[in-house]
Amino acid sequence: MEFGWNEAEASYRQRVQALLAEELPENWDEIALHGPGSLAQTEFSKRFCPRLAERGMLIPHWPREFGGDDGAPWDHFVLGEELWSAGEPRGPQYMNVNWIGPVLMRYATSAQQERFLPPIVKGSTIWCQGFSEPSAGSDLASLRTRAERVEGGYVVNGAKVWTSYAGLADNCFLLARTAGEGKGAIVILLTPMSSPGIQVKQIPALIGEGDIHEVFFTDVFVPDENRLGAEGQAWEIITYALQNERIGIARYAFSRRVLDRAVAKLQNDGRFDDPVVQDRAGRALAMCEAARLMVYKVVDERAKGHPPSAFGNLARWAVIQADHAVNDFLTEYMQEGLLGEDPMQQAHHQRAIAAGIASGAAEIQLNLAARRFLELPSEGPRGLRT
Amino acid sequence: MDFEPNEDQAAVLGGLDQLIGTLDLEPPREGAFAAFSPALDQELEESGFLQIALQEGFSLLDAALVVERIARLPVSAECAASALVLPLINAPERRPLALGTGLGSPARFLPQARTLLVDCGDDVLLVEVEPDKVQPVETLLAYPYGRLRTENPEVRALGSSMVAPLRRRWRLALAVEAAGLMQGALDEVVEHVKTRQQFGRPLGSFQAVQHRLAMAASTTASARWLAFRAAWSDGEADCAMAAAYVQDAMPRVTYDLHQFCGAMGLTLEFKLHYWTYRLKALLGELGGSSPQARAAAMSTWKHAVQA
């Protein structure tokens, strides 16, 4: 057991930091103001990600056969930590490298891999995640969007909601239901967003621009060759995808960066002399570092090739607490940041308020931790279906 | 970065578990507030586990692993100060060690201690303790407490340069022990809610109970990793942060753990208080959570960071 970085890991982090210093423009904070899904940041990602790819830092952890570098899992995580801390210049493309690509590598046909992976490898494509619906949020297995079997494929009718990045996405990782109930009747359709019958409407919200949308599907034809996996296999694929998604973002790193900046400002203003402010900042700091170690523990398990464990659910809870601790501190002691003085603080605030809701509500994480980590008895028929 | 014990650490913990397995460590069930185990204390001293940080090839982190494991037990032994603070003065023969903030103040383990270290703010005083000069203190808090009968004992001043190291290691010892106590208490309560039936089903099947226990599990794991990292780095900020985090969490976690055991958890025959009332004792140590939180902040942001 030890908590330091070896020489190779430290050197890799320096490379990422050097790259960011070189590639991020002076007005990066303005570009990043409205979040990874905004038009400005998405457009930037289409210039930035190809540069990352050229320098071998877009998908270093992918296997060589898919264009990666067989890199160490820690390198991938350090990369994500530095990029998220910087405001995520990959825009929505972090999702591609974190979980969409790995899912395609594991479950897609050769033809699907040839079609969908190269644009991810080049850093030139945006995906959205067609999971949640008006009546199926945390209870994902109750989704109702229909995929009716027709000759040569499916006809999709229904609606998705809260879909991040849908307005600018090229493809949707779409979940829909064939005839039947339950998890076994769900299929995954890799659906081009240019397909006739898809309508996207952005939902104005407290969180970042382009972060949530409604997506309507009206008689959208999706050919058989776009189905990922077999019918009946979708839930296995989704479970695998969520394991990669839920701990993929180093949220605490951005929280820590924003906290550091806030303390610097408070020190310069003389407000950090107040012991109460020091106390509150210290508690928020401890929450950030706790979240960091909890996530590192999960990455360590992955790096050693252990199967995914329920510890990830505990880590997710710690990450949410850290986001809120920092956000609450800033909202109380740095109100000017939300009054136009600090775009980065506002961006952090907007991410923090969604931290316990996006990617599976915090309470779902607690359900899973209770059942899988503490091995508490099931609630019975009214319990989780996941 | 490696979160698993290495071969040596696994062997140390295996040996410790073996030793623990040979002892009768059931606490008294007839109305005791504290459960100090002289047998455990003596075995730990004689077997060398508490001196591990001073042994060649071992470190403070190895000592922390030992302390955390011992703290999970329902009975106590003076281990955290011996294993993590005493190496500062390189005098393992001086244990058991009590830590205090005043010569006349009650201190944990003082009735058993051979040495008392007092953090006076501008100096550290060392007192060689004679058992007949200690007055035991009756308390709900589940450690043996005592205070010196005299307010003017013979002392040796260790100097102002010892103040910061003592405080750092005291914070570390507190954080590591508290992490183990939380784990011990959580394990006890999880077992209870799995078996205790109400409304025809186990208490632990109710979501209201599940969520708060899952939160406690996340908090406990966080406390443990912060404490172990602090032992690894032995840094001011890390030690203060680990202590601040766990002290901050103690009221919330101990409330929930007692709540799920109902009135049974308030009786002395139920074991829960042996962990929770040690946690409550640690909550008030070193001035409570605020000095630790402020120390974490001040040592992390000593100078204005780049805006």
Image: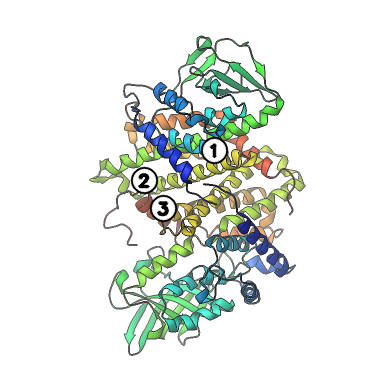
The picture quadrant where one finds residue A28 is: bottom right
How many other residues sit within 10 Å of disc 3, few (<14), some (14-19) or many (≥20)?
many
Looking at the rendered structure, the secondary structure element under dot 1 is loop
Any mark on residue B58, and which?
1
Residue at the spot of label 3: A366
Instruction: Give the letter of the chain under mark 1.
Output: B
Instruction: Give the letter of the chain under mark 3.
Output: A
Amino acid residing under circle 2: Val
Residue B156, how many percent across, how many down?
66, 17
Q: Residue at x 34, y 77 (%)?
A: A230
Instruction: Give the letter of the chain under mark 2.
Output: B
How many other residues sit within 10 Å of disc 2, few (<14), some (14-19) or many (≥20)?
some
| Residues at marks 1 and 2, CA–CA distance in whole angstroms | 41 Å
The picture quadrant where one finds residue A48 is: bottom right
Residue A193, how many percent across, how many down?
49, 82
| Residues at marks 1 and 3, CA–CA distance in whole angstroms | 37 Å
